Amino acid sequence: MNIYSENNNIIIDELNDFDIEEVLECGQCFHFTKLGDKRYEIISFGKYLRIFQEPDKLILYNTTKEEFEGLWRRYFDLDTDYAHIKSRILNLDIRLKEAVYEKPGIRILKQDFFETLISFIISQNKQIPHIKQIVHTISERFGDAIILEDGRRVYAFPTVEQLSVVTEEKLRECKVGFRAPYIKCAVDMVASGEISKEKLLSMSVKEAREKLMTIKGVGEKVANCVLLFGLGFTDTFPVDVWMKRIMEYMYFDEPQDKKTIEAFAMGKYGELAGYAQQYLFFYGRENGLGK
DNA sequence: GACCAGGGTAACT
DNA sequence: AGTTACCATGGT
């Protein structure tokens, strides 16, 4: 990895194991828009980023060295050695070879905790395009505007304070349906300090999961997604219907409980479970495994 | 433990 | 165009 500034852009070349399309389209992130082939805009932590990946380099437009170092470097998980992770996963189970090789550029993004929590509460019972639509609507209505150089406005995901004054009624108008009271509960618990990123990070993964599940509307799966994408606990294995199908197809000849699958995966992949899950999810989903 | 509601779009016929 | 599938969670 070689990083330098050119005009107002940050350029990264000799970057391995990174594909912007795979990173964004693998189901972990909802607040981005595709502009073209390998061309995206992302809004995270109150900042806007336009990004383009050419065959030999990644371009982050209008980004200072400070912003890159202070935000995007960590967000894209650029300092984690994915070649090493992949080789360790394949040592645990060579049958993941196809999944890992088909999507070799996946990264687990380090996203904002609060946005991740609310986004994955919204995600239940919904498909990715709809989740994205709702996250955009909520941002537009309740979040800060970011004014771009061409005058266009985009919107940051609202802060805890901004969402804490939004009624269930107003949330329902964003099409969240029966999840409105769940979102309210999560916002209130974060606003009061009952739930916080700092507290959760000081706990074991098991304690943090249990704590998250005290929020109404947060069950095992949503909690695991928040742990993995919003808190950086990579030793967790979210199981939704897709993962259930994929795992049953790969490892079992008959249907299994999600609980059983999760326990099996944790035993097999251990601290690498979160990474393994992401390779499997994207691969299995695109290939319609087990359908 | 099994079953169903709830919401609105995506993805199928 | 109409129908079915999607989806996790909580409540029964």
Image (tube, coloured by chain):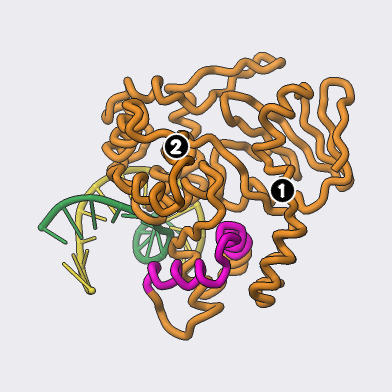
Chain colours: A orange, B yellow, C green
- Segment tinted magenta in the rendering: A257-282
Name which quarter of the figure residue A85 lies in.
bottom right
Instruction: Look at 43% across and 40% down and name the residue there.
Output: A200
The answer to whether residue A276 is magenta is yes
Instruction: Look at 35% across and 39% down and name the residue there.
Output: A176
Name the foreground residue: A35 vs A29.
A29
Name the foreground residue: A194 vs A29.
A194
Name which quarter of the figure residue A37 lies in.
top right
Q: Where residue A251 sits: x, y (%)?
A: 53, 80
Residue denoted by label 2: A134
Residue denoted by label 1: A80
Instruction: Look at 46% across and 35% down and name the residue there.
Output: A197
Instruction: Look at 44% across and 69% down and name the residue there.
Output: A263
Q: Where residue A237 sits: x, y (%)?
A: 50, 60
Can you say whether A231 is above or below A170 in the image? below
**Disc sitting over residue A190 in the figure:** none
Secondary structure category for the residue under label 1: loop
Can you say whether A166 is above or below A112 in the image? above
Task: State which mark lies toward you, 1 or 2.
Answer: 1
* Amino acid at circle 1: Thr
How far apart in space, not on screen, are marks 1 and 2 (Cα)? 31 Å
Q: Where residue A280 sits: x, y (%)?
A: 60, 65
